[in-house]
Image (cartoon, helix red, strand yellow):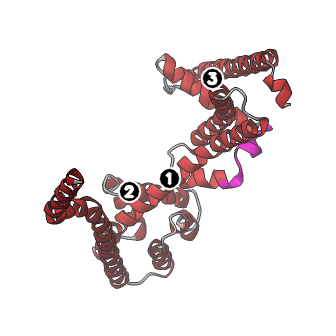
Amino acid sequence: MDRLLADSQTRMLLVAALLVLMVACAVVGAALVARAGRQQRSRAVVDRALAARDGHVAEPPPAGRMAAVASAAEHAGAKLEHGKLGDSLLASDDRKLIDACGFRNPARARAWFMLARLLLAGLAPLAAWLVLRARHADLPLAYVACAVFLGFGLGWMVPKWMLLRRIARRRECAEAELPLFIDLLRLLQGVGLSVDQSMHVLIQDFRSVMPVLGGELKIAAEQYARGRTREQSLSRLAQGFDNDDLSAICRLIVQVDRHGGAVQDPLARFAERVRERRRLELKARVARLTVKMTGVMVVTLLPALLIITGGSGFVALLRGMSQVMGEG
């Protein structure tokens, strides 16, 4: 294989074959996007006709060429989800990650995730191969195969890493919003509101200051209105953030909704415990920053300190050595 790749004519044929394959993939992708766009336009026409017959106002079509292209790409991703490659491109763990990310439209998020994974997994190996061939024409095939495999792995995992980063940020935001959520819930329960009324007030009036927990409470309220129990509707909030305090508060809400009882004292204890834990975390963070700053001070100030304290001695020593060498 190395002998074949060493031949310039063979390399040119291989590059031409890869270019033809890229063009074919681009043509197939363009055909899929165009087909999805035609189907979307047909569906929009049917929706407008049905809405006009029923006396309702249909949603306007996406304005602009970029919006139309984005919508067509979204429909192409949705077709991939329901096609043969759906289970390979979107495993059950990936579905759970997308659901835990808190997107407003999970179906659209799944479509974009699959499309991004397919494109990156196809383009990253090709980019790795082209870069290696441009810099090292006589590179062994084993190195090229490793680079292509590494590019495929990176292209396959980058969308999942982005989801994990979003989930980590949401967990941090939920942990920061938890003390305010406890205080507001204790206040609303203290004035005599029920659990449903308290959640409604939290969703409607305080979602701007609690975007993560407010969105999760809205989903829980919608699920409870559709007929699920309070425990089932709060299971996503209790298990999706890996927070023991939040899980305990959800269990307390379920218990109060099921059996009744005073909730102010348990919430007060929860709030005090959360504040104490945050205080300890801040102390630990300050201690870590102090240790890091010690290293920075040693690296930056120690050379200056040595120059100030021992600079004159070094200069005198160098002068003495130069005089001795001059006399010699």
State the CA–CA distance, disc 1 to disc 2. 25 Å
- Of the numbered discs 1 and 2, the one sitting upstream in the chain is 1
Between disc 1 and disc 2, the foreground one is 1
Residue 91 colored in magenta in the image: yes
- Where residue 158 sits, quadrant-wise, is top right
Determine the image quadrant of residue 114.
top right
Q: Which residues are magenta?
A: 84-93
Instruction: Inspect the image, locate mark 2, and give the three-letter code of the amino acid beneath it.
Output: Ile
Which residue bears the numbered disc 1? Answer: 165
Identity of the residue drawn at 38% across and 56% down: 203
Q: Which residue is mark 2?
A: 203
For discs 2 and 3, the disc positioned in front in the rendered view: 3
* Real-space Cα separation, disc 1 to disc 3, in angstroms: 32 Å
Residue 169 shown in magenta: no
Q: Position of residue 225 (x, y in %)?
A: 52, 58
Q: Which quarter shows the N terminus?
A: top right
Which residue is located at x 69 percent, y 39 percent? 147
> Residue, x 57% and y 50% (percent of image)?
161
**Circle 3 Cα neighbour tier, 10 Å, few/some/many (<14 / 14–19 / ≥20):** some
319 or 186: nearer the viewer: 319
Q: In which quadrant of the rendered image does the C terminus lie? A: bottom left
In the image, what residue type sits under mark 1? Arg
| Nearest the eye: 53 or 75 | 75
Name above or below for residue 313 compared with residue 215: below
